[in-house]
Image (tube, helix red, strand yellow):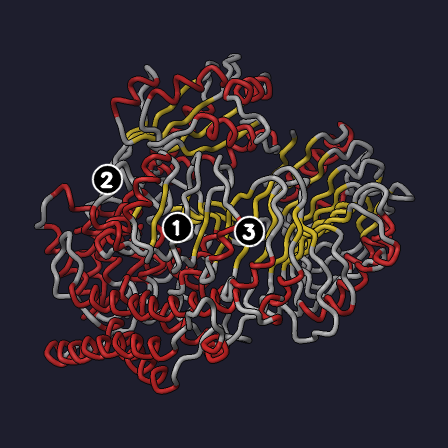
């Protein structure tokens, strides 16, 4: 809920000022104590508050008053911060001009053109809004007493759900006959390329069926190529072709801007190969008309599966009968519900009767069953609680039919814990069917400030736990996993996104810009600009918006970036990386920014004024044309956690930290990506003690720096390292050492001999993912002995082209799951011991020698004869 998010955000600002290394302002201790007491009470009140407002377009008045009051306090504090920093910046104080922030008392003494920053006015303004919050607190106390609210705390049953790992298998309960029917159409004798539509209403299971088929062992074996893309209502032909081409070739094709070029390249690659392409969530036949010619028909049994809600669209796509999804019968509904709530455990007898009543109210719609099941899976196992859910569902059944499904899903939202509601509401601002990168999502949650702190846990850890809980409740879908099983991308079902969007709009949680600017836009704290928004609409909206906006998130191809200097409260600024407009340097005057991501013009250099951003957590710079340089003042930014420069081929020069200032450090820095010729030394590693992710590249050989990679071992918390060494600079690798904390390693080795460096890597106890590109084997062979790579799950060798033989001894690679070899043309055969790795799931070969492919297939056949099933899946491109 918006009110709870606002309270947590305000508490976070107060706490940050109290514990900041050099806070820009100070707050009176009595005011801090008074605010903390009020905020703590109101948070606890909202955690048990049940709004008396019935479903409708209006939000609860008391909740909105709480939200507005909390925002008013934030505005008073952050406005004072702006005034103090701007005055300090123009003052003659030499220390500040070097990037330091002076405190409020000092700033009040500085004079600029006869003006002063008045602390007295600040304290008076702050006291006024505190008193308003106190009035609301008293009203909440009366409301609580009158309603005799009893706090309901949901208790999770530890270990009871298979979904606790957040990785769920698609459950096709009740659709066995449909699966068999579709498999027959895919692998049957018809040699023509066929279009197979899967039709049915939202939430009926079309995408789940398609995903189940896509991952089916028979389909993997039958088709040479598999690819999946989501179309949605606002489709983009170039993106669709690019996604398919990337999946079938393994290469990104962003350098091809023309649709026809992409299509022709795709057509050429598909020729002579039997393929299956999934086009998920199609709304118009127009998109198929634009891409159909790029999918060749050579009578080889290729298939295209289309999922759509529109039965008439299916008829336009093909003359063949479509696969129609139906509602589940009672038995299948009960089986799906049971598996969702209790996994493989038995259903408690005392809950069976009420459970069947609840299932009956879901009317056989799989989405409703799994969402309500996800709610109950995280709830108390009491008859009283389940009866309350059934009672609410009964009232929904009697509501108007066109709102039925959303109202069923809203019940799950209503029963979310207060701390999860802001995270769920935030999801609706992403586009329909958008693949949401989890790392970006969690950083945005953190920058918005509505994650409630937990003792001894970072905000990133809290965000990860919240995401997993929403996945367990079936409100967020896992879309793509990383190489070691982590959630990399997530999505939302359309109906669930609609629910999130409607609730967020009702509570003024954010506003997604459309074709017009409503009168209420000036009260919105978060403004979202989708891809389809015109520049004129943006300009009109900027004139209407209030400068109170806290977030400006642009996901579109804009031809202009609006003027932002008036938005003094802006915390989150995220613009799409392929926009035609660019951010200007003056964004670094928005001193309250916590998250800054955007594209800058060629030749852009990060200004020293970046140090004015006293609470900046995340800095992501997209920049074409040439390298950029960070100022030395960046070392004084104690709050920075993530710094990234994006675009292959370009990077950022990071200067050495200032000497003689041991307190100048980035102790909170966890991510540093895109740095060129990074001068790691004893002083530098002391300044970044908590770094977890480091991406560096060396392009210039400076003799005093060639041993700098030996200092990597001093980074005791480093988990992910990406190190690129260009041809001619291999001397950097001679002294490289790795910390034992490393989990992921990407190493581009030039022409360096790999034996010595792989010996060091093999002993890393926690390493799960290893990618090695280039490099040579002096003896043209690689031997892995027992005990090496004890935790490795993913291994990729790319263009180590002189490796002829590979030997495995003993029980090495005991946890390996995925092996990927690319352009290993000299490898003659696979070691037979590869078939003895019990954890191995797949081996992918791309541009490898024919003899290696033959030897691998022989190993698979031998293992299949012994075990009855193939030991792992083999993909050859």
Q: Nearer the viewer, residue 96 or 76?
A: 96
Q: Position of residue 119 (x, y in %)?
A: 39, 78
Callout 2: SS: loop
Give the quarter of the figure containing the C terminus.
top right
Q: Which numbered tag is attached to residue 327?
A: 2
Q: Which numbered tag is attached to residue 552?
A: 1
Give the quarter of the figure containing the N terminus.
bottom left
Tell me which residue sits at (86%, 42%) in the image: 728
Tell me which residue sits at (37%, 35%) in the image: 535
Q: Residue 132's image quarter?
A: bottom left
Q: Check if mark 2's residue and mark 1's residue have beta carbons within 8 Å.
A: no
Mark 3 or 2: in front is 3
Q: Position of residue 449 (x, y in %)?
A: 40, 65
Sequence-wise, which precedes: disc 2 or disc 1?
2
Callout 3: SS: strand
Q: Which numbered tag is attached to residue 629?
A: none
Q: Residue 717's image quarter?
A: bottom right
Mark 2 or 1: in front is 1
Residue 332 seen in the current view? no
Residue 848 seen in the current view? yes
The Cα atoms of the two marked residues, 3 and 2, are separated by: 46 Å
Sequence-wise, which precedes: disc 3 or disc 2?
2
Question: Is residue 675 found left or right of 130 in the rendered image?
Answer: right
Determine whether 479 is above or below 607 in the image.
above
Q: Position of residue 497 (x, y in %)?
A: 31, 47
Q: Position of residue 311 (x, y in %)?
A: 26, 25
The Cα atoms of the two marked residues, 3 and 1, are separated by: 15 Å
Sequence-wise, which precedes: disc 3 or disc 1?
1
Tell me which residue sits at (73%, 57%) in the image: 789
The residue that mark 3 highlights is 620
Q: Residue 67's image quarter?
A: bottom left
Tell me which residue sits at (35%, 32%) in the image: 234
């Amino acid at each position: 809920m918006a009110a709870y998010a606002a309270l947590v955000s305000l508490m976070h600002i107060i706490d940050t000022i109290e514990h900041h290394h050099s806070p820009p302002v100070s707050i009176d201790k009595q005011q801090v104590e008074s605010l903390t007491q009020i905020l703590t009470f109101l948070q606890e009140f909202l955690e048990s508050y049940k709004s008396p407002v019935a479903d409708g377009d209006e939000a609860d008045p008391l909740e909105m008053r709480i939200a507005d009051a909390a925002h008013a306090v934030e505005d008073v504090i952050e406005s004072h911060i702006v005034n103090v920093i701007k005055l300090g910046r123009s003052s003659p104080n030499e220390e500040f001009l070097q990037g330091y922030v002076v405190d409020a008392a000092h700033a009040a003494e500085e004079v600029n053109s006869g003006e002063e920053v008045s602390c007295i006015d600040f304290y008076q303004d702050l006291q006024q809004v505190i008193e308003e919050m106190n009035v609301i607190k008293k009203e909440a106390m009366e409301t609580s007493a009158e309603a005799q609210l009893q706090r309901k705390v949901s208790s999770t049953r530890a270990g009871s759900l298979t979904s606790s790992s957040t990785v769920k298998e698609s459950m096709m309960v009740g659709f066995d006959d449909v699966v068999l029917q579709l498999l027959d159409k895919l692998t049957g004798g018809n040699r023509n390329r066929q279009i197979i539509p899967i039709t049915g209403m939202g939430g009926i299971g079309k995408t789940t069926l398609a995903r189940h088929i896509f991952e089916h062992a028979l389909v993997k074996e039958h088709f040479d190529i598999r690819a999946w893309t989501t179309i949605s209502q606002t489709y983009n032909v170039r993106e669709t072709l690019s996604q398919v081409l990337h999946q079938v070739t393994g290469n990104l094709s962003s350098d091809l801007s023309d649709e026809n070029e992409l299509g022709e390249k795709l057509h050429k690659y598909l020729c002579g190969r039997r393929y299956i392409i999934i086009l998920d969530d199609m709304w118009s036949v127009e998109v198929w008309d634009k891409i159909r010619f790029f999918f060749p028909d050579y009578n080889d049994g290729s298939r295209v599966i289309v999922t759509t809600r529109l039965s008439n669209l299916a008829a336009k796509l093909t003359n063949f009968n479509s696969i129609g999804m139906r509602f589940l019968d009672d038995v299948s509904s009960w089986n799906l519900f049971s598996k969702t709530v209790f996994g493989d455990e038995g259903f408690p007898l005392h809950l069976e009767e009420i459970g069947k009543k609840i299932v009956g109210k879901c009317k056989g719609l799989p989405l409703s069953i799994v969402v309500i099941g996800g709610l109950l899976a995280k709830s108390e196992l009491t008859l009283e609680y389940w009866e309350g859910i059934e009672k609410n569902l009964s009232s929904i059944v009697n509501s108007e039919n066109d709102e039925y499904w959303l109202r069923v899903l809203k019940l799950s939202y209503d029963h979310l814990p207060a701390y999860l509601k802001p995270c769920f509401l935030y999801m609706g601002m992403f586009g329909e069917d958008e693949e949401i990168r989890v790392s970006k999502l969690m950083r945005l949650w953190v920058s918005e400030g509505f994650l409630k702190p937990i003792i001894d846990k970072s905000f990133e850890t809290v965000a990860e736990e919240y995401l997993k809980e929403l996945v367990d409740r079936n409100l967020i879908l896992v879309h793509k996993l990383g190489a070691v099983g982590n959630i990399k991308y997530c999505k939302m079902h359309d109906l669930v996104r609609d629910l999130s969007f409607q609730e967020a709009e009702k509570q003024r949680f954010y506003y997604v810009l459309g074709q017009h600017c409503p009168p209420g836009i000036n009260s919105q704290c978060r403004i979202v600009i989708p891809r389809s928004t015109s520049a004129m609409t943006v300009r009109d909206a900027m004139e209407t918006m209030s400068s109170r906006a806290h977030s400006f998130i642009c996901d579109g191809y804009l031809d202009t970036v609006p003027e932002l200097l008036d938005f003094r409260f802006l915390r989150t600024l995220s613009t799409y990386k392929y926009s035609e407009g660019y951010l200007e340097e003056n964004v670094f005057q928005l001193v309250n920014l916590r998250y800054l991501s955007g594209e800058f013009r060629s030749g852009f250099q990060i200004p020293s004024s970046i140090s004015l951003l006293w609470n900046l957590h995340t800095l992501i710079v997209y920049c074409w044309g040439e390298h950029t340089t960070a100022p030395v003042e960046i070392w004084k930014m104690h709050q920075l956690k993530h710094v990234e420069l994006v675009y292959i081929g370009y990077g950022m020069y990071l200067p050495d930290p200032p000497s003689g200032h041991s307190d100048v450090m980035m102790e909170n820095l966890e991510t540093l990506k895109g740095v060129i010729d990074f001068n790691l030394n004893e002083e530098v590693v002391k300044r970044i003690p908590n770094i977890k992710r480091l991406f560096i590249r060396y392009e210039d050989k400076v003799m005093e720096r060639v041993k700098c990679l030996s200092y990597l071992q001093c980074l005791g918390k480093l988990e992910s390292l990406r190190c690129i060494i260009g041809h001619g600079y291999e001397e950097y690798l001679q002294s490289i050492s790795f910390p034992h904390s490393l989990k992921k390693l990407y190493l581009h080795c030039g022409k360096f001999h790999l034996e010595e460096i792989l010996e060091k890597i093999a002993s890393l106890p926690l390493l799960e993912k290893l990618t090695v590109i280039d490099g040579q084997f002096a003896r043209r062979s690689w031997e892995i002995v027992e005990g090496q790579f004890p935790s490795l799950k993913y291994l990729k060798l790319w263009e180590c082209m002189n490796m002829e033989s590979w030997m495995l001894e003993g029980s090495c690679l005991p946890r390996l799951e995925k092996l990927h070899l690319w352009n290993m043309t000299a490898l003659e055969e696979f070691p037979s011991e590869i078939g003895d790795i019990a954890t191995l799931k797949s081996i992918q070969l791309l541009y490898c020698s024919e003899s290696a492919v033959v030897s691998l297939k022989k190993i698979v056949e031998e293992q299949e004869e012994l075990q009855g099933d193939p030991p792992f899946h083999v993909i050859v491109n």
